[in-house]
Amino acid sequence: SAVISQKPSRDICQRGTSLTIQCQVDSQVTMMFWYRQQPGQSLTLIATANQGSEATYESGFVIDKFPISRPNLTFSTLTVSNMSPEDSSIYLCSVEVWESAYNEQFFGPGTRLTVL
Amino acid sequence: SQQGEEDPQALSIQEGENATMNCSYKTSINNLQWYRQNSGRGLVHLILIRSNEREKHSGRLRVTLDTSKKSSSLLITASRAADTASYFCATDAGGTSYGKLTFGQGTILTVHP
């Protein structure tokens, strides 16, 4: 398994500002993912972040709004830019770990963002 | 787009009873994973079942997979109040989508003491 931490755990932000969320893993991993969970909803993949390459974004998500960094194999950041109330969500990072030939995916505790 | 559908959307049972949640998906998969989420916190990985497996057990959890029907079920036996949470299935289609999970809408389970 993997131990994943995220900072901040929650934040309340003003419209038009930006917030950077950090994700730290206790072991080196190749693939990291960022998900969004809107209130009362399921999770939606924002992007895949691989070290040494540009993040790959899913349909409906763009780099200008959600820039991602992946400077090494244990760390990644997601920035939510020019925020609006619609960005209020839980943002979660995840990593893929191979356990006995199974590629299980583990999630961080999430960052609960409220935009006023 | 979300390809997973789960039913029921909400399930309320008494402690000691069994809880069964179902998940359907639309495309072929490499594996399917079940997660638990307590009160909007992070997801806890419960179990992974690969496309060539039909059943897996882990403690009080039993997962089945029917690829011909594109469906999976999660059974929690002898439920406890601490099992109260939201449960999600997530599929990994493999191939070019390898590692990218598509989540179902989730089942909210409430276990009454």
Image: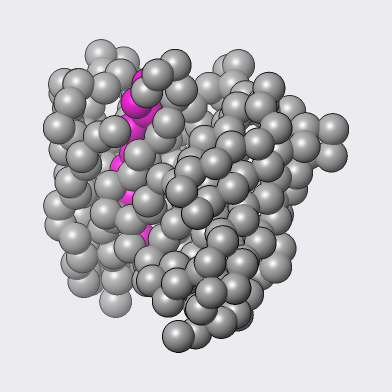
The answer to whether residue A82 of the structure is visible from this angle is no
Q: Quadrant of residue B5?
A: bottom right
Q: Which residue is at 46% across, 48% downward?
A: B59
* Residue A112 is one of the magenta-drawn residues: no
Relative to residue B102, is residue A43 drawn left or right?
Answer: left
Locate residue A59 relative to residue B2 in the image: left or right: left
Report the front residue among A11 and A9: A9
Whole-percent x, y for residue B79 in the image: 51, 69
From this view, report whether residue B64 is shown above or below residue B41: above
Please name the residue shown 59% across and 79% down the image: B13
| Nearer to the camera, A109 or A59 | A109
Where does residue A97 sit, x and y in percent of width and height?
34, 26
Q: Position of residue B22 (x, y in %)?
A: 70, 55
Q: Quick check: A12 left or right of A96?
A: left
Specify whether residue A76 is in view.
yes
Quadrant of the frame with the N terminus of chain A: top left
Which portion, as a residue range, is magenta?
A90-98
Residue B25 vs A41, above or below: the answer is: above
Residue B88 against residue A41 in the figure, above or below: above
The image shows residue B31 at horizontal and vertical percentages of: 59, 29
Toward the bottom, the furthest residue is B113
From the image, give the main secondary structure of the stretch colored magenta: strand
| Residue at 53% over, 67% down | B78
So how many labels did they put on this image? 0
